[in-house]
Image (spheres, rainbow, N blue to C red):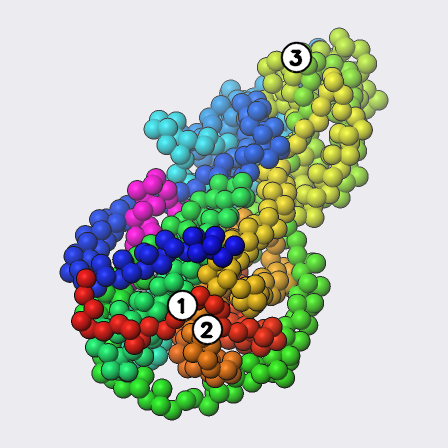
Amino acid sequence: MSKLVNLLLAPIKASEEFAERFLFHRRILVLLTFSLVTLFLAWQAAQIRPDASFVKMIPTSHPYVENYLKNRDDLAGLGNSIRVAVAVNDGDIFTAEFQQTLQQITDELFFIPGVDRAALKSIWTPNIRWTEVTEEGFVGGPVIPAEYDGSPETLEQIRVNVLRSGQVGRLVANDFRSAIVQVPLFDRHPDTGDKLNYQELSQQLESLIRDKYRSDSINIHITGFAKVVGDLIEGAAQVAVFFGIAMLITLVLLYLYSRSITGTLVPLGCSVIAVIWQLGLLKLLGYGLDPYSMLVPFLVFAIAVSHGVQIVNTIAQESARGADSWLAARRAFRALYIPGLTALLSDGLGFITLIVIEIQVIQDLAIAASLGVAVIILTNLFLLPVIMSLVGIGDHATQRARRAEQNQNSFWRKLTWFSQPKGALCAVTIALLLLIGGLYQGKNLQIGDLDTGAPELRQDSRYNTDNRFITENYSTSSDVFVVMVTTEAEQCSNFTSLALVDRFQYYLTNVEGVQSSVSLADVSKRVTAGLNEGSLKWRTVSRNQLVINASLSYVPAGLMNPSCSLLPVIIFLDDHKAATLQRVTAAVEQFADQNDSEQIVFEMAAGNSGFEAATNEVIGTAQYQMLAWVYGVVGLLCLLTFRSVKTLICIIAPLALTSILCQALMASMGIGVKVATLPVIALGVGIGVDYGIYIYSKMNTYLVQGLPLKEAYLNTLETTGKSVAFTGLTLAIGVVLWVFSPIKFQADMGILLTFMFLWNMLGALILLPALACLLNCGPVSGSKQPISSDLEVNDVV
């Protein structure tokens, strides 16, 4: 085993000596190379654009989504779509002014690129018709009569046609004060073939529809996935503002900590360079930034600052011992190379484990975060020491570090109580109690959305206000769940199929959360009753196939496919909360298990709620798989580096406690595990492991020298521990301001990241030495030795 470990670590040890000599003896070449690469990648980063796709947000390998994609061409309008509600502030919609406005809005939406024009629905489109039974049989036509001229007579005719069309509660509000235009979307631009630009589409909806037609008498409400994404991208400006505020706070606190202009600007500048490199490389690789990965650059900045502070702190200590700037930077590089590289590799490999979640938006986030960590190795672990070797830390910072070494802080000495048996036992006992409490509260953690509307936005946001308007004024909500009933060709309209679908719809009426449903069976029943003088006794699926055929002479689009092998059942839900979706999917599965046969099969699911249900299932399974991979990878790297199971426990246990407490916090705050929140747990582990690795690595150098644990821990607190405390507090202060963001998911991330920054810091400073004491951890054999005395100025290539 020892030989295997040495074999695995040999390349890292070999790279350390080579990298050190190359960097510090070719500093001008290194700086020139980094400058040119930074300029090129900055040019690339300036061209990166928001990138969002409906397909990226759903798990395409899930059976529900596979069923939808298989029948996608026959399910027009049941995938990605938006709804535009045009409302009057006074009166009703049966006025010439309103009808003219509705017609113009319908026409404007028809010509927006990316709209599936054939499936667009409005009372002004020819695919929305009315039917009526007369003594001569069925008569019907478009809702808007051909002779419409805005006169009171034709407006009254529209009122009658609307009542006969069955669209009240669907395309026309129950109170007749608004009407909806249903706008299905393609995933790609029909002319260019590029992915549909949701930012541009959202701007068009605002400028061409809302701003143009909203007035004192008309109001516009817009909902749908594309609008949510558009509003999130629009909020990117606020994200940039909060990012700038966090940078400013870090700048001020870093100067107060280091008392050095170069020790402040250089690590901050290198951290910004890391973000520039990350964005530039993403652009080169063909990626953009979707709304859920816009926070990743800040996380990269945070990790970079964390490592930069460690390097600057070590340089200040070496300078205080008499080394010049070149020697101090080189010693700092040698001291932090292996722990820093181990921490960053743990971060990167931990982030890349998010790829196990088969949702493209999370996989893209994993790549973006891992790429960002990779460039930190170059910008902060390599470039930063080289720049500091040229500019130096400054006399003021050197004198301050010298005074700190001579006068130990009483606060740090008090913390050494946790490295003694009584204090350690107290710390571990409290940790166990927190663990029990976290596990108990974490049982309430739910998968999926726990609020109505778009939980990514605040409840008083424009989008959620629009969504509430549609929910309150229409019988059919915007939360649509579609069950695809498949049969053999030409068999979707036979009595057996329609009768079973009718029974299925009646079965759904007893499922909590289901508002209503519509299918081909409803068309057949309504027309059959109409053929029999409108008698309700005939409002059923006829056993006579000839009667069924006659009832289906005209079928609205979307209720069957051309080969009559698919009839979707469109289910309207109260909301898309996780509990609602669980009840509906469980009910459909139960019915399918009891009634599926070779002739007819009930398959889930299309519609926005169907996709949400599939996403919840994937996340519910993947979250534990992801955590297993994250901790497995981080644990393996720590084990290879320190070669001690006890050390592994000391580093991993505080991280695990933080993860459990974070889940308990999410449950307490009503934050569900979903696409936007799942990655934060892995990202928190990646950031927290840095603290543990740096603390234990430094403490081990003193243990190797023969110091007892208490003294080794005290010396660690005075050096590395001080940097960890500063970094944790600084980053927490930077992200806690996110709670004021208009984007709710950013505010939620701010709370969760603040919690994880602080608890990871406390775990590394308190729980780690306590575990080391109770586990009786001694110096790790074969570990990195202190090198301050073995590196001299005349050490040349």
Residue depicted at 53% across the width and 44% down the height: 356
Range shown magenta = 269-290
Sequence-earlier tag: 2 or 3: 3
Residue linked to disc 1: 784
Magenta region, main secondary structure: helix
Residue linked to disc 3: 489
Q: In the rendered image, which quarter is residue 727 located in?
A: bottom left
Tell me if I can see residue 431 in this picture: yes
Q: Secondary structure at mark 2?
A: helix
Residue linked to disc 2: 700
Sequence-earlier tag: 3 or 1: 3
| Residue 345 painted magenta | no
Residue depicted at 30% across the width and 67% down the height: 333
Q: CA distance from mark 2 to mark 3?
A: 73 Å
Q: Nearer the viewer, residue 286 or 395?
A: 395
Mark in the foreground, 3 or 1: 1
Residue 105 at x, y percent in the picture? 45, 35
Residue depicted at 74% across the width and 14% down the height: 494
Residue type at the position of mark 1 = Lys
